[in-house]
Image (cartoon, rainbow, N blue to C red):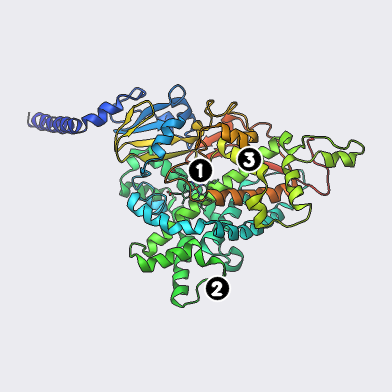
């Protein structure tokens, strides 16, 4: 009897609190009703084990948004509005809304420009922007070109062997090294710093943070920390933080000894120097914050950039027609035939630098336009930043007058927005002509979502394009690429935060100048 009374009391209290809560948030829940939602169950909402058991969310998003442009998805009691239509996305992204990680990535990535809320983000953005000025980017190109050249050398041992290798690990290490030198002023050759484990740790971090978002039982900090320790993932967290921590500590010591920046004479405005200077002006930039700011820039910049280089190389290897020159000029001998059958991308490169010249900053800045089209088209189809999260600060009115409630999580699925038939005639086909000047002009302004739009769009847009151009141009300049993959089918892709290839990036390299290209 007593037990029954206790239970009845608890149930009454629970229902009363619930009623008061819903009455207070009545408008919020009324507005949510405007959007379709799959059948919802108590406690779990729309969460189905099949949705998020694996590390692949692509099918889930495709299924959910198959017949809807907008959909509310409930993760337990928490709603997320999923969007894939350009007009809706544009309205939301042009507002000053925050990314909503709810601190769920803090153990991995701390707090910095990517995760901070508006007030702190503004400080980070102001601080970091000078590191991405045209003047600085021009200087970074020397590092891009030197590291790309080293990558070409690494591939030498595979070239001509007929063996396919998965290019991604090599590209990833190159991108981490490039960003370390440009952003942190640390030359891996001179400092002997080890970057190999960083890429793997980063991949684990990204996948884990996303998984935590859809696993409410992992939300409590203490449970997640225990999970990290017991699952052996803590070692990846440590690997990720080690490098930026060392660099911050070393730079502070150098500054204190007044010997800063002797390692890299051009680094006076590289990110780490800007951060260390800020430390003296604003006490919020503690050593930990500096480490985390660095970690977030390196993490955001290296994976995305590396994935796009790997995808572009694979697409060029698959699309021999893009590599093959449009016109036949000579037909006489086998040798002539080889000269004629050059890739379109390769022709653009050789017209610029000949067969043996070195690449310069000017080449990357002002030329290689067709290669840039290939890079941008690859981003459209396989954008590493496949989806992003936002949290509305206030109500927003969409183009058709639907009101989006304040304080709502928004999931923007770029991967699907990039396949909008209203924007791209044949969106499932890889076609660099989608990024010709005329094609861009024919689409609504700002509809290129590759680097996002609005106040929180990518700070490293130009950096990424230049760095991608350098690596791909140098590889294509030296090697002809081919692959056993005939088509990168949708089922070969998977998605965590990034789009990845389930079949890797298997590419066969053949020396350009000595042998006739294969598969032609
Ligand atoms: C192909 C390569 C890249 C792609 C596709 C990419 C894409 C993106 C996207 C979609 C966002 C999110 C914008 C939003 O939430 O609205 C972003 C943010 C960001 N990216 Fe990139 N990015 C790339 C390379 C880089 C590089 C190389 C760097 C730095 C060296 C970088 C640094 C950042 C930073 C710091 C942010 C946060 C900006 C902010 O909150 O103000 N990214 N990027």
- In the picture, measured across the screen, residue 278 lies left or right of residue 434, that is left
Compare residues 215 and 77 and report the one nearer the observer.
77
Pick whichever of labels 3 and 2 is earlier in the sequence: 2
Q: Local crowd at mark 1 within 10 Å, few (<14), some, or many (≥20)?
A: many
- In the picture, measured across the screen, residue 508 lies left or right of residue 339, that is left
Q: Quadrant of the N terminus?
A: top left
> Alpha-carbon distance for marks 3 and 2?
38 Å
> Alpha-carbon distance for marks 1 and 3?
15 Å
Q: Quadrant of the C terminus?
A: top right
Compare residues 439 and 247 and report the one nearer the observer.
439
Pick whichever of labels 2 and 1 is earlier in the sequence: 2
Q: Position of residue 50 (x, y in %)?
A: 43, 29
> Alpha-carbon distance for marks 2 and 1?
34 Å
Pick whichever of labels 1 and 3 is earlier in the sequence: 3
Secondary structure beneath disc 2?
Answer: loop
Q: Which residue is mark 1?
A: 451
Q: Which residue is mark 2?
A: 262
Q: Which residue is mark 3?
A: 373
Q: Residue at x 43, y 44 (%)?
A: 208
Q: Is residue 293 above or below residue 20?
A: below
Mark 1 CB lies closer than 8 A to ligand 1: yes
């Amino acid at each position: 009897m007593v037990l029954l009374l206790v239970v009845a009391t608890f149930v009454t209290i629970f229902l009363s609190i619930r009623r008061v809560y819903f009455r207070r948030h009545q408008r919020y829940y009324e507005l949510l009703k405007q959007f379709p939602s799959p059948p919802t169950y108590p406690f779990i909402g729309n969460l189905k084990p099949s949705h998020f058991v694996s590390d692949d969310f692509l099918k889930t998003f495709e299924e959910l948004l198959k017949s809807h442009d907008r959909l509310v998805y409930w993760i337990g009691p928490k709603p997320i509005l999923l969007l894939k239509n350009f007009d809706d996305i544009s309205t939301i992204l042009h507002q000053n809304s925050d990314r909503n990680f709810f601190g769920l990535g803090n153990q991995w990535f701390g707090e910095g420009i990517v995760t901070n809320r508006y007030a702190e983000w503004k400080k980070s953005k102001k601080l970091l922007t000078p590191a991405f000025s045209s003047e600085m980017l021009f200087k970074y190109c020397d590092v891009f070109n030197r590291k790309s050249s080293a990558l070409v050398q690494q591939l030498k041992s595979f070239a001509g062997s007929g063996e396919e290798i998965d290019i991604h690990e090599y590209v990833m290490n190159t991108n981490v090294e490039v960003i370390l030198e440009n952003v942190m002023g640390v030359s891996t050759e001179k400092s002997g710093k080890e970057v190999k484990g960083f890429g793997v740790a980063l991949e684990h971090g990204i996948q884990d943070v996303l998984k935590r978002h859809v696993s409410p039982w992992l939300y409590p900090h203490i449970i997640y920390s225990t999970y990290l320790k017991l699952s052996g993932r803590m070692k990846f967290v440590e690997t990720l933080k080690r490098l930026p921590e060392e660099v911050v500590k070393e730079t502070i010591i150098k500054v204190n000894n007044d010997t800063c920046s002797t390692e890299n004479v051009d680094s006076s405005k590289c990110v780490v120097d800007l951060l260390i200077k800020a430390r003296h002006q604003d006490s919020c930039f503690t050593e930990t914050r500096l480490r985390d700011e660095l970690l977030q820039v390196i993490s955001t910049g290296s994976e995305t950039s590396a994935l796009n280089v790997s995808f572009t190389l694979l697409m060029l290897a698959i699309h021999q027609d893009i590599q093959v020159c449009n016109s036949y000029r000579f037909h006489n001998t086998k040798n002539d035939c080889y000269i004629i059958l050059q890739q379109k991308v390769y022709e653009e490169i050789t017209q610029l630098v000949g067969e043996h010249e070195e690449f310069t900053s000017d080449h990357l800045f002002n030329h290689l336009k067709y290669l840039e089209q290939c890079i941008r088209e690859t981003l459209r189809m396989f954008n590493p930043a496949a989806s992003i999260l936002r949290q509305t600060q206030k109500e927003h009115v969409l183009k058709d007058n639907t009101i989006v409630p304040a304080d709502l999580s928004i999931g923007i699925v770029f991967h699907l927005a990039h396949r909008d038939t209203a924007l791209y005639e044949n969106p499932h086909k890889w076609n660099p002509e989608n990024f010709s000047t005329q094609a861009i002009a024919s689409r609504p302004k700002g509809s290129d979502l590759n680097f996002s739009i609005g106040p929180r769009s990518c700070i490293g847009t130009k950096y990424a394009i230049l760095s991608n151009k350098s690596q791909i141009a140098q590889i294509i300049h030296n090697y002809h690429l081919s692959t056993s993959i005939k088509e990168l089918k949708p089922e070969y892709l998977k998605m965590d935060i990034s789009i990845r290839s389930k079949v890797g990036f298997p590419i066969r390299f053949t020396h350009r100048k000595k042998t006739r290209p294969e598969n032609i």
